[in-house]
Image (tube, rainbow, N blue to C red):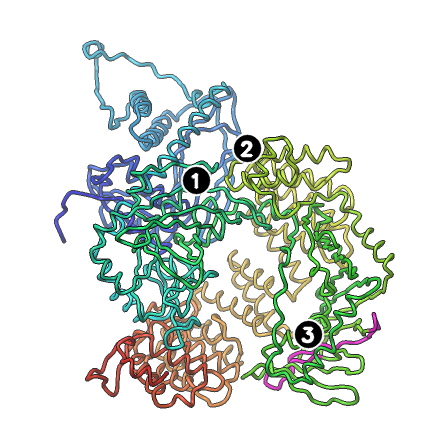
Amino acid sequence: QRASLGWTNLDRAFAEVIKKAPADAQVIYVGDGIVSAGDTDPARFVKRLGRLFGEKVSRTFHAVTVGNITEAVVLKGIATVGGGSVRSISGEQTALVVAKELLNEIALPGLREVNVEFRGLKVAAVYPERLPNVAAGTQQILVGRYLPEGKDQVGEIIVTGKRGTEAVRYAAKINFKDAEEGNSFIPRLWARGHLDHLLAQGQAAAVKDDIIGLSEQFHIITPYTSLLVLETDADRERFGVKRRYEMRDGERFFAQGRDNANFELVQQQMKRAGDWRLGIRRQVLRSLAGLGRNPQVFQQQVQVLNEMARAGGRGGYLGEYNGPVSYNDAAPASGPMGGGVYWGFAGRPGGGGNGRFDVDEDFGGFGMDGAKDLLFLGDGLVDRLDREEQAAVSDSRDKAERLSVDALEVWDSDGLSLGFGEDDRKELGGRLSRSLEDSVELLSDFDEAGQPGQERGGELSFYKNGFDGGEMLTKSVSDRSGFRRSGLRGLEAKNEVFSLGAALGAKRKMASKSAMMGRYYQSYQPDYTSWLSNLFPALPARPGKAAPALPDPEGWSPEALALSRSLLRVDALSKLPGGLELKRTVDSFDPRWKRQSAHNTDLVLYSPTGWLTRTLDLDEQTIVNYATAQERGVFSLALLLGRVRSSAESERHPSVLGLNDSSITALHEAYRGYQAKLEAAGENRVTLILKPKNSVYEQHLLIDMARHVILKNETFDDGKLIGATTFDDFVEVAGTWLARKLIVTDNKGRKTNETTLDVKVLTAEEHAARMTAQLAAKTYVQFLRLPYSKLSVARQKVADGAASFDDRITMILHYASLQQWDELLKQVDAAEALVQMLAVGKPGVPWIRTAALVAMRRNEEARQRFLAEAKQLAAAKTRDEVYLADFIHGQAAQVGTGSEMLDLVNLIKPVYERQAAELDVMVRWQEKMLSTLDALGRSEEALALRKAMVEKAPWHVHWQQDVAQRMRNAGQYDAAEKWLRNEIARDIERPDYEDETLRGSLTDLFRTRGQWDRLLTFTTEWIAKNPESSSWNSAYAQHVSALVYNDKLDAANAIVEQWLKEARVEGKLTPAQRARLESAINFTQGSAYNISFQRADERWFGLLAETTRFFVRHPHHDDLAHRIFNHHYFQQSEDCDRLRDEFLNQLRTGLADLTPAQLSFLVNSALAGRLELVEPINDRKQLQAHEVPLDIWKKIA
């Protein structure tokens, strides 16, 4: 214990906690909430806390107070912003009681991310504004105002949130009687909430006046008022206090004067904009004020890195891959010894390389060689210092203050400079903090997917000579990934990298040319534009220049290469005088159930001058892709929306035919890494055998050398046939032969797939006519031309009144990314007006408004539009109607309640009923009905429907599992068990995963009922069948878990040891042996099915070391040595330290016998941590990997 100094720096405390606490942590603050360092205003502290936590809080914060003097605003702010609760230890609420309640809340979090919506009522000033998590068994009281209308009012309250990972939604009717009786206490409850809201806004004069007025009205003490009780009129007269008469005034929260309301909104927005601009400046200056002021950081770096290297494996500094740096020694890099280490920064995966400062453009990580330089970590930003600079770091505190960014330009959302002055730049001191990322918003153009992504340039200046200042250099920088609303994501400098972290302004040469500086969890970006992009079918980007041709692969003889090239038909098809019409029918079969499982058709029109493809399935969306000499486009016949751009010559290629006979892509290109061997197979026939190096996998292709076609393609695994494709019914096209029938069979010769091609040769005129007919619908399609209009150009055209539809789309994307929905709707109005002026209508354009309303959460308006579309769809048969019904339902599910969705589902039922029986689309409607019944809580009806569906389609094993689980949830345990046992006993061939799914459901049922003896009996019978699955919930994992739950730990240990030892065979393990070994390894590493020991029993380390020794050079299963050795528990054991010494000795004495894979593993393992030596080195029996003398490594190298 220590004596309190009476000071509380809450800003720094919470900043440190957020850095160190892992994601999903539960953080408990114990104190009075009184801020006594820095800016002590409670309201401003809460606002700072909100900015610190960010928009998406990944940790939960609770506040517990232990005294009578507290700051309620701060305590409630901690809990509200952090999604937790406030508790007080006093009186009967002892520390024990509060601790139990808090633990109950944490263990059973109940409902989180709670949101409440009122429908049918006009409400205002509802508190709390941000709802905390609601623990199981607790309640949350809301108070607010509603507008009386002189009559009884009926409305609906909708509560949404998450329970675990499941999104939930509750709705209830509410009735407000016009004549209020018996609730006079409610106004004071509301006043208390409203006062807390006002107190959190700060100390402005207007806010104080409101607080005092409300306090006097409802007789509630605040920091600005006190309570004076006067019992007589004489006392009131003496103190000058008037008697007040209470009256209802809730109407003032529902201003009838629209002008007044608009004026107030404008004032609020102007104030918010001004505060935002000032906030950026203040936030940056505050965040940068304390950086680089702790010289101990530099002194501790070597020890920190050594500890991280000691840990090895995959882990993170301050959290796995979530802290400023993470480490992975298993990544394939090129380090000093041919192995390598990868380091990742700011929550990103790492990069790697062999230079002294390498930056990985694709991963945004920094590579290191670990030999020459010290790695400096500075608040998520990274710099490399050489030895001379390291000496300068020790006195960097004073020198760093002399550095400045001479010209720092920051733009607001309209591209206007925020104008940092000279004094501000000096205070910035060359550092760019994450707080800047959270605040800055820059203009961006949009890529072809509708995402912000075009490069945006700027300039940053820095000093050439590092700490000592000197010549100023200015570098143009651009954002590789685009500036989004979340702020700055990355900087790229041409040929040079500069870090705004430790060595401020120090210039760095580098091999690559981009460095990413991002905040934690940078991969997550809010997406506000996909709703629009998803309406338009995707169009591939315009191809660039073709890659240079690769040399002929090794392992292919000249004869094999010639045979591969003889199969190609690209040249012949590219010289067709006319064209081809190809109609493809693909049927899939399930031989176990003797049924056809799928049927698909598509059409291809091809000629060297242009092509078209389209789907022909009646139950799917019809997508038309086409390419001509002028344009490449795609459109949907269902939504009548599409995209188009200029075409490239390389796109008019025969590959569009989709032939799977190696006639378009050469075999030697597709199988470049394989060894090719030819064997004679009869007259004019040869078998081409393709085999990867060091593999038992083979492809056998029977080839007709006269017609230059493949007749059969067989796949073998370790000599066993696992599947074959037969090509048949050949027809001559353009002087080449084309197979019109492809039949795929399984390892038992049963047909699983059949493709039939109907091929017609067309003249040039016939092909042109067919293309024209298929593209006739283009007249009614609204196309989006790519690339998108530049934002600056579109904005200017809008201002000039000359904007096109494409310009309006760019502005819609822009306002959507900013969530400026009113401005967005203006652009939608303008786009619709443009379309209405056309001679031919564009029926697909209204979908844009509907999707926008969904994105804006104007749910009722969107729902009504979906209902109107559904009614029109149900009334008459139309093209792609099944897809449209699916689409409408999927979109409406985002805005409708259970009862509303029930109406919609019933409305679209005729669409499914009138389809042909062979399409089997009624199943889709039944699934929609099931989700609706589940949402309404009508579980009995849903269960009955599920049973009916699975009885008609028993091959859906997950449906079988779902029915059993629903029975279990309904308490029908015996019925669920009977259902599962009947299905397990069904006389049908099942793959392992299906059998495991059903049996696993039965074991879960035993666990639910606490029938541990029956569970053990069942798993014992199960493993006796020698199942081959090695999944996490395999029979063997379930059996070990059952032994533990039956208090038979000794038996579990014995069987695990048996499985470990029996797997040490020189040959290849059987699948069952491998599965048992996998479960045994998991158990020794501290886990089994439904069990986590959070540690590994030391008794296993010796046996694991023996197993690693056995498999490290195993010809078939050396991966098992990696799996055991690289586990973090084993890495911390003395047995592992001794293994590192053995591996080092193997490298010193038996290098010639090692394969490249074994060599890589042994080098990486010997470098991974401490070595326990049998023979001392320099009179030491323990060494860290970096302490091994360099001479030893030189000899190995």
Residue at which label 1 appears:
411
Task: Determine which quarter of the picture holds residue 870.
Answer: top right
Residue at which label 2 appears:
822
Q: Position of residue 726 (x, y in %)?
A: 74, 77
**Which quadrant holds the C terminus?**
bottom left
Chief secondary structure of the magenta portion: strand
Q: Amino acid at mark 3?
A: Ala
How many neighbours does mark 2 have within 10 angstroms: few (below 14), some (14-19), or many (20 or more)?
few
Q: Nearer the viewer, residue 91 or 779?
A: 779
| Residue sitting at x 54%, y 30% | 120
Question: Looking at the image, is 19 positioned above or below residue 243?
Answer: below
Q: Amino acid at mark 2?
A: Asp
Tell me which label, 2 or 3, sits earlier in the chain.
3
Tell me which label, 1 or 2, sits earlier in the chain.
1
| Residue sitting at x 22%, y 46% | 94
What label sits on residue 476 in the rendered view?
none
The Cα–Cα distance between marks 2 and 3, rounded to whole angstroms, is: 55 Å
Residue stretch in magenta: 713-735
Q: Amino acid at mark 1?
A: Trp
Q: Nearer the viewer, residue 775 or 150?
A: 775
Task: Determine which quarter of the picture holds residue 663.
Answer: bottom right
Comparing marks 1 and 3, which lies closer to the viewer? Answer: 1
